[in-house]
Amino acid sequence: MRIIVVSDSHRHFSALAAVAERHMDETNRLLFLGDGLEDLQNLSLLYPNLSVCAVRGNCDFMGDAPLTGILEAGGKRIFYTHGHQYFVKRGTGTLEAMARRQNADIAVYGHTHVPYEGYRDGLYLLCPGSIGSPQTGRPAYGIIDITPAGIVTHLCHL
């Protein structure tokens, strides 16, 4: 099972659409981690069969999406959030603690605009960076592959 993870489009719809176009043959599952819910609404019009889970970010003033979510996929639990309420720009300790309380196997977050993937004591961590306004390098996004052999996270660039 493959899940595309995108965050922080910040009105760069064309970048979000490019990611969807690149991966639509592989999956129709997308996790959107906030700061661009308007872009996501437009993407849903373009791809009505896209299965989307989304949270709002600190810049989604009009959004009614929740701040956090849990996705059960391939027998694994994914805790997802934008991350600002867990102070992820200062580190992931608070986020990790919440993900563990939720019995998550994977924790994904945005907000930092800096791509990151890691593994700590049984918990996979993934920040896809920003598809719209990256802090380092090119626009980035993430992929989670859940297979019978385990979990693999990937960072990708446009």
Image: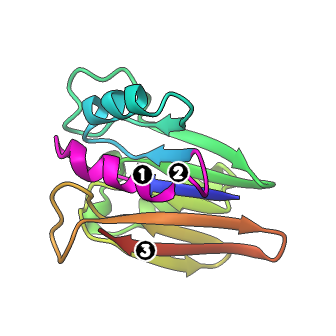
* Residue designated by label 1: 21
Q: How far apart in space, not on screen, are marks 3 and 2 (Cα)?
A: 17 Å
Q: How far apart in space, not on screen, are marks 1 and 2 (Cα)?
A: 6 Å
Membership of 22 in magenta stretch: yes
Mark 3 or 1, which is nearer the eye?
1
Q: Which region shows up in magenta? A: 6-28
Amino acid on which the number 2 mark rests in the picture: Met
Residue 63 screen position, x and y as percent: 30, 23
Residue drawn where x is 39% and y is 46% of the image: 33
Q: Residues within 10 Å of mark 3 (few under 14, many from 20)?
A: some
Q: How crowded is mark 2: few (under 14 residues within 10 Å), some or many (20 or more)?
A: some
Q: On the image, which quarter does residue 13 sit in?
A: top left
Circle 1 SS class: helix
Report if residue 109 is visible in the image: no
Mark 3 or 2, which is nearer the eye?
2
* Residue designated by label 2: 24
**Quick check: 96 left or right of 158?**
right
Residue 142 screen position, x and y as percent: 44, 65
* Residue designated by label 3: 155
Amino acid on which the number 3 mark rests in the picture: Leu
Q: Look at the picture and state if 128 lies above or below 25.
A: below
**Quick check: 21 left or right of 42?**
right
Quarter of the image containing the N terminus?
Answer: bottom right
Membership of 18 in magenta stretch: yes
Q: Residues within 10 Å of mark 1 (few under 14, many from 20)?
A: few
Mark 3 or 2, nearer chain start: 2
